[in-house]
Every structure is written in C-alpha cells, then in structure tokens.
C-alpha cells in the first residue's frame, strides 16, 4: 500500500529503479493555493536522463488530469500540439476523471504502484 508522508515533508518515491519503468511520487506544493494541503501524485516515465524534460511535461499533464482544473489540464496538454479530436478526447477524459471519488483515484494509484513493482517492469 501507499503510505502518505506527513504534510510537513516533501517526498518523491521512485517505485522502480530500472529505466523504462513507471515512477510514482508525490509532493506538497505550497505555491499553488488551489491545491494547498493536498498531496499531488505525479507520474512520469523515465527512459534516460535526456528525456527528463519530456517526462516533466508528461508528469504535469497527469498531475493536471488528476488534481488540476479543466483549464490547467488544457494548458498542460497544449504544448504537445494535439489536433481537435485529441483535444476533445482529453477534455472528455478530464471530465470523467473529475467525477471519480478520491478513494477510486487512490486505488488507481495503488494499482500503478503494483504494476511498477511487478517483474514485468524489470
């Protein structure tokens, strides 16, 4: 299971040390008032140090998907130049994710943790 650190700490957990595996982490950003006091779950794919910038952008999209506003999610997706169909699909996805209860989102993150630790990610 995922255990959450105390609110006074910032932490990033790497669930897999091998390149190409999924990494899950969280941090408490004090600079975002709308999310103050909330833990932000960040997903990123790490293939090589050279991909860090791309991974940060992907992490921003996922962060906005689960915790951001529709406008912040749209802004996070925009740098990838999605076509109209992709934008519509992303908007629909955000709408659906926003309907999920917190415990469901937590279960999704636990599943990602389990997948990341599996031998298939080795």
Image: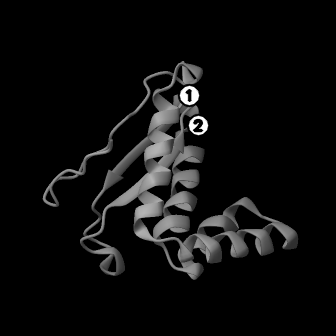
| Residue under the point 49% across and 48% down | 43
Q: CA distance from mark 2 to mark 1?
A: 5 Å
Where residue 41 sits, quadrant-wise, is: bottom left
Q: Residue at x 30, y 80 (%)?
A: 33
Choose between 72 and 22: the one closer to the eye. Answer: 22
Horizontal side of 101 relative to 61 (left or right) equals left
Label 1 crowd (10 A; few <14 / some 14-19 / many >=20): few
Rendered location of residue 28, percent (x, y): 27, 61
Q: Residue at x 58, y 69 (%)?
A: 97
The residue that disc 1 covers is 48
- From this viewpoint, is residue 37 visible? yes
Could you tell me which quadrant the N terminus lies in?
top left
Indicate the position of residue 21 as horizontal and vertical percent values.
54, 30
Q: Using a 10 Å C-alpha cutoff, classify the residue at mark 2 as few (fewer than 14 neighbours), some (14 to 19) or many (20 or more).
A: few
Nearer the observer, 56 or 40: 40
Q: Are marks 2 and 1 in contact (CB under 8 Å)?
A: yes
Q: Is residue 17 above or below residue 23?
A: above
Which quadrant is the C terminus positioned in?
top right
Query: Where does label 2 land, which residue?
Result: 51
Q: Position of residue 65 (x, y in %)?
A: 56, 66
Instruction: Please tell me the numbered disc located at residue 3.
Output: none
Name the secondary structure under disc 1. Answer: loop
Looking at the rendered structure, the secondary structure element under dot 2 is: helix
Q: Is residue 83 left or right of residue 95?
A: right
Residue plotted at (41% across, 57% down)? 106
């Amino acid at each position: 299971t995922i255990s959450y650190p105390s609110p006074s700490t910032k932490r990033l957990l790497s669930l897999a040390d091998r390149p190409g595996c999924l990494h899950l982490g969280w941090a408490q950003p004090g600079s975002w008032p709308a999310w103050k006091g909330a833990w932000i779950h960040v997903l990123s794919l790490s293939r090589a140090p050279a991909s860090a910038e791309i991974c940060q952008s992907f992490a921003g999209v996922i962060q906005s998907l689960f915790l951001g506003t529709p406008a912040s999610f749209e802004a996070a997706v925009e740098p990838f130049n999605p076509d109209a169909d992709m934008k519509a699909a992303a908007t629909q996805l955000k709408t659906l994710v926003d309907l999920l209860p917190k415990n469901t989102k937590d279960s999704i993150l636990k599943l990602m943790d389990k997948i990341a630790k599996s031998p298939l990610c080795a």
